[in-house]
Image (cartoon, rainbow, N blue to C red):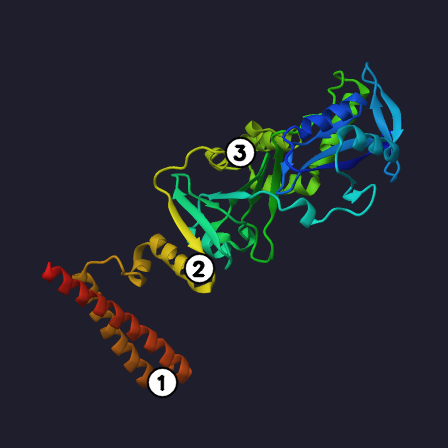
């Protein structure tokens, strides 16, 4: 058979209710018919269980002919898709069978019938990553972030998805690891250029329960076609190779990374991929159930006020050097009083300069007034906080 005719179909089996054995039932039914391809792990939803299979076909037609593998690993023509899928529906007792997303015997079931998918856990990790950026990227919807510093940069686990594309260039590169059931993915975001609206990324995807329908004899035509199918499903192309080369400059590591993304996925390979890109592989361990360290901090976001307040608190935590002067909440009462008097004194001098200096006359008056109001308000607020703290300390 001409390899140019090679294609595949995505067949999705849906069982209403909880079916822990769904993946094995589907794999057995496909293996009994000697089909060529892969079966993913069971995906649990609120009201149903899904299993997806990618099966090789001779041609890309709707009612294509499926490949069948004989005992010696040679490829034969099997049944046509429509006939075989009806047989598979009966033998597996699936409630729905979808071919490339469409039900074969009627309307495609909607979310009300199937229920929502289980929760997705996300972990973001980067050497330059900042908590304030992660809080802002979490958006204004209700979210819970768990953050900790690990020695190799910040790690942040989010209950809901985070808009990672909005994280600033100065905090890249970083890796975003997500898990939903038995599937894991690593999305690496590079530094990119200022002109790029969306930064460049590479993704590595792993289904921990994915299995081969039948394992063909080594070096047989079926084994070669299975490798071709696997590469097609991974979807890695020349652009991804070029982007990966931007992220990894060491030629030996680059070659290893390219081998990983074009081979069967596993948890071990995912951790190695993360390591080759300069990240801590323990981030994968935390995503897959390793107990979190003791130095975590939990931040709740939701709505503009709560989210902005949380972001400012993280920004204050991250402040270094002169930047700390903007955040004096943790200072002693004496230091607060002294610094506030200095702020008010410098504000008075600045106010005088704005009114008297001809070079500064071009600044619009409303802008000057706004600047001075903020300046004085900062000084008065921390002066009052310092005096109150001193009174409380003396009372004790």
Residue 310 sits in quarter: bottom left
Q: Position of residue 349 (x, y in %)?
A: 26, 77
Quarter of the view holding residue 305: bottom left
In the drawing, does residue 374 fall left or right of residue 90?
left
Number of the front mark, 2 or 1 = 2
Q: Which residue is mark 1?
A: 358
Which callout, 2 or 3, points at the residue further toward the start of the chain? 3
Q: Quadrant of the N terminus?
A: top right
Q: As drawn, is 280 to the left or to the right of 31?
A: left
- The residue located at (76%, 25%) in the rendering is 29
User: What residue is rendered at 78% in x and 41% in y?
Assistant: 100
Label 3 or label 1, whichever lies nearer to me, is 3
On the image, the x and y values in percent for residue 20 come to 63, 30
Q: Give the number of the disc on residue 295.
A: none
The answer, for residue 312, to whether it is visible in the render is yes
Secondary structure, mark 1, is helix
The answer to whether mark 2 and mark 3 are in CB contact below 8 A is no
Q: Label 3 belongs to which residue?
A: 276
Q: CA distance from mark 2 to mark 1?
A: 42 Å
Name the front one of labels 2 and 3: 2
Label 1 environment density (alpha carbons within 10 Å; few <14, some 14–19, many ≥20): few
Whether residue 362 appears in this view of the structure is no
In the image, taking residue 197 as reference, residue 157 lies left or right, namely: left
What is the C-alpha distance between the residues marked 3 and 1?
Answer: 58 Å
Give the residue drawn at x 41%, y 46%. Answer: 147
Which residue is disc 2 drawn over?
307
Badge 3 vs badge 1, beta-carbon distance below 8 Å = no
Rendering coords of residue 132 (x, y %): 42, 54
Identify the element where label 3 is drawn.
Answer: helix
């Amino acid at each position: 058979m001409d390899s140019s005719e090679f294609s595949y179909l995505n067949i999705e089996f849906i069982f209403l209710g909880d079916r822990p054995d769904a993946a094995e039932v589907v794999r057995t039914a496909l293996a009994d018919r000697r089909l060529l391809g892969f079966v993913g792990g069971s995906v649990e939803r609120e009201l149903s269980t899904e299993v997806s299979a990618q099966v090789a076909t001779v041609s890309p037609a709707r009612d294509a002919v499926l490949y069948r593998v004989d005992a010696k690993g040679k490829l034969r023509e099997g049944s046509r898709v429509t006939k075989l899928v009806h047989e598979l529906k009966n033998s597996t007792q699936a409630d729905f069978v979808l071919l490339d997303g469409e039900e074969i015997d009627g309307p495609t079931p909607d979310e009300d019938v199937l229920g929502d998918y289980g929760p997705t856990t996300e972990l973001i990790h980067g050497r330059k990553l900042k908590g304030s950026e992660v809080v802002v990227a979490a958006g204004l919807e209700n979210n819970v972030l768990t953050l900790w510093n690990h020695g190799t940069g910040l790690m942040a686990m989010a209950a809901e998805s985070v808009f990672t594309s909005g994280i600033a260039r100065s905090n890249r590169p970083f890796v975003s690891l997500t898990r939903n059931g038995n599937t894991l993915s690593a999305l690496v975001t590079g530094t990119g250029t200022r002109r790029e609206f969306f930064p460049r990324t590479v993704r590595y995807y792993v289904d921990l329960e994915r299995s081969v329908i039948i394992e063909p004899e080594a070096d047989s035509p079926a084994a070669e076609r299975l490798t071709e199918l696997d590469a097609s499903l991974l979807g890695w192309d020349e652009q991804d190779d070029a982007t990966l080369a931007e992220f990894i400059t060491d030629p030996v590591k680059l070659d290893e990374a390219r081998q990983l993304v074009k081979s069967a996925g596993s948890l071990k390979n995912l951790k190695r991929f993360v390591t080759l890109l300069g990240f801590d592989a323990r981030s994968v361990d935390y995503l897959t159930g390793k107990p979190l360290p003791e130095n975590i901090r939990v931040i709740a976001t939701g709505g503009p006020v709560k989210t902005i307040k949380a972001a400012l608190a993280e920004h204050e935590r991250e402040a270094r050097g002169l930047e700390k002067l903007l955040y004096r909440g943790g200072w002693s009462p004496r230091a607060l009083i002294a610094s506030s008097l200095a702020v008010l004194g410098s504000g008075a001098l600045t106010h005088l300069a704005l009114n008297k200096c001809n070079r500064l006359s071009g600044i619009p008056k409303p802008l000057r007034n706004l600047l001075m109001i903020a300046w004085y308000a900062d000084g008065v607020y921390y002066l009052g906080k310092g005096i109150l703290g001193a009174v409380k300390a003396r009372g004790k």
